[in-house]
Image: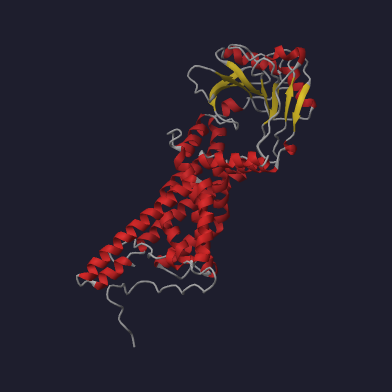
Amino acid sequence: MTTAPPTGTDASAQPAAPPPRSGRWAPLRPLVLRLHFYAGLLVAPFLLVAATTGLLYAGSFQAEKIVYAEQLTVPEVGDAELPISQQVAAAREAHPQGSVSAVRPAPQDDATTRVMLSGVPGIDEDHTLAVFVDPYTGKVRGALEQYGSSGALPLRTWIDEFHRDLHLGDTGRLYSELAASWLWVIAGGGLVLWFSRRRALRRVRGTGGRRRTLGLHGTIGVWAGIGFFFLSATGLTWSTYAGANIDELRTSLGHSTPSVSASVGGDHGGHGAAAAPGGTGEHGVGLDKVLASARSEGLGDPVEIVPPAEAGSAYVVKQVQREWPGKADAVAVDPGTGEVVDVLRFADHPLLAKLTRWGIDLHTGLLFGLVNQIALMLLALSLIVLIVLGYRMWWQRGRGSAFGRPIPRGAWAQVPPHILVPLMAVVAVVGYFVPLLGIPLAAFVVVDVILGEIAHRRGRRTYGTGGGTAGGTAAG
């Protein structure tokens, strides 16, 4: 004997999933569900932009090699390279404006040398003009604007800034920090919901409708969850507000990133004058002797030579290889004698400084090269698909024309005080250190409470005029 579905329900709807097993943390599930639903609904647009621009950025490394092949490579590998001083002189002859801020000798046999010029008219203050020189012939093969320690050229720079701040400056950086602040919360909530129902053991094949969408959403989320936690954590390390708190914490623990001392004392201090506009970056013993001194300390390619910044300063030569195994040793060389006056080995960096370096390099697709970049692209695609499936589930939650039915209220009331109070304390601490998580979460709670009170009062008024059923539903 069959029974007709209750009035107001959809007879074709999928059967409800079995209730979760009762347990100590069972009361938290409705709260996690409500947070996951609303956070995903409201933050997903920011995450979608971050994932799409991140996908483009991960592919920009290989695109850069193709687009700028003429500047980055030489047409023919010669028998011997010219002294670095001659290569810099050739670059300055072609581009006499500005001053030499750094030099990167050719790291491979078929690569060009980069001579970076600062203070060039038309170049942003925090960018440099990179002049590319054939190390065998001294011919200048072009000049391009460059940004950052990874030497990003115009294509990658544009995509990088689009991903970081949508080309809106400091204001635009709030979007990416908001996305990074909430990604781990949404991913963690999704994992809790998935495993609390043992959905990881169920097959998607053979199901349909919202349950199939949910199965696909959960399966992809489980496989990509660890990657999302990583992207969130590393993205926050150089964000505006959370990043500043992380730096302060590292400093207080004595784990800030050290730097080589460029101070030169004694009679040779005067040779460390800052580079004058139009100069070649040569001071005292010159670039060739400085590079030879750095090589004697074991600094292999790729390296960057930074001329003295001011009187009494030394040359700084540092390794700039970001791929594994990384090379990040640095030395300071006295411009008057060519002697190494300070050495800083990456092996001696504090642990948190190393982890930060590796984390950023992994986040930006540098640490493991092409494999790293492909993994980032897959993570970005996974996040995009998850967001699309999430909105589809929201649509499918509705009955008839009332799509996007919200998660029922009352989740807070189901959590026992001995769990709720410590939980709120942890949330408050995390929200303080990650303000673009804490502030929106506090705003959401306030708005949710106000809307709940409004709904409750409307329900009581409706009940008082004879509409008991409607009022009870509104106040739920």
Q: Is residue 367 visible?
A: no
Q: Is residue 2 left or right of residue 205?
A: left
Instruction: Count up the numbered dots.
Output: 0
Image position, residue 143 (x, y; %): 55, 21
Within the image, what quadrant is residue 77 found in?
top right
Q: Is residue 216 left or right of residue 96?
A: left
Q: Eyeballing the image, is 222 above or below 342?
A: below
Residue located farthest toward the bottom when viewing the structure as drawn: 1
Image position, residue 357 (x, y; %): 64, 40
Q: Residue at x 51, y 61 (%)?
A: 421
Q: Is residue 121 left or right of residue 332?
A: left
Image position, residue 28 (x, y; %): 49, 65
84 or 292: nearer the viewer: 292
Q: Where is the N terminus found, in terms of image quarters?
A: bottom left
Within the image, what quadrant is residue 362 found in?
top right
Q: Is residue 73 visible?
A: yes
320 or 141: nearer the viewer: 320
Within the image, what quadrant is residue 195 found in?
bottom right
Image position, residue 182 (x, y; %): 48, 50
Q: Where is the C terminus found, in terms of image quarters?
A: bottom left
Color scheme of the displayed model: secondary structure
